[in-house]
Amino acid sequence: MNFRTHTSHLLAALLLAGCASTVLAQDAIRPDQAVRFVGKSGMVCGTVEKTRYAENTEGQPTFLYMGGAFPRHTFSARIPNSQRDKFRPSPEELEGRDVCVVGTIQRDSSRAEIAVSSPADIKLATIK
């Protein structure tokens, strides 16, 4: 199966699971392609390769790294400390799992990033 077919199955599962966003298969963005969509709203889907709670960084964010493990990742989702306790499963439990992150894609160094504003911005997914 190619990525588009995987994405179609993934989106069907998300919509059946009650995903609030209405998206089309071609709207799903792979982590390695997200930097091409900087400044636009989008949905980035992939496997969380690594998580990191940056306790010593301003705002104490938690990062979900996708498209490779830190520091060679191509995309990250940044969860503010104020939202950490609202996640079920916890951000650390997302490591190794497939997710879709929805929001405005921003540039962070040479990578793409979405600043997560609530747990609703991240959905568990099934990518085959």
Image (cartoon, rainbow, N blue to C red):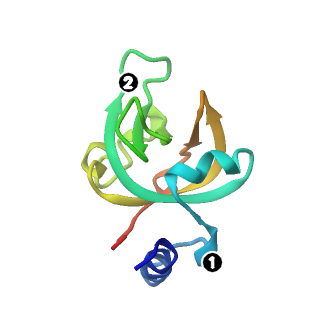
Rendered residue at 40%/41% (across/down): 65
Callout 2 crowding tier (Cα within 10 Å): few <14, some 14–19, many ≥20: few
Q: CA distance from mark 2 to mark 1?
A: 34 Å
In the picture, measured across the screen, residue 78 lies left or right of residue 52, that is right
Write the residue at 27% across / 43% down.
92
Above or below 57: residue 33:
below
Using the image, tell me which numbered label, if any, was put on residue 40.
Answer: none
Residue 95, percent across and down? 28, 48
Q: Quadrant of residue 57?
A: top left
Q: Position of residue 37 (x, y in %)?
A: 69, 51
At x 47%, y 83%, the residue is 12
Label 2 or label 1, whichever comes before in sequence order:
1
**Circle 1: element type:** loop
Between residue 125 and residue 82, name the one nearer to us: 125
Q: Secondary structure at mark 2?
A: loop
Q: Quadrant of the C terminus?
A: bottom left
In the image as oriented, which residue stretches furthest toward the right?
39
| Quadrant where the image shows the N terminus | bottom left
Residue 81, percent from left and from top: 43, 32
Residue 36 relative to residue 84: left or right: right
Q: Which residue does the numbered mark 2 point to in the structure image?
A: 54
Residue 24's tag is 1
Q: Quadrant of residue 106?
A: top right
Q: Please give the count of numbered marks on the rendered protein.
A: 2
User: Amino acid under label 1?
Assistant: Leu
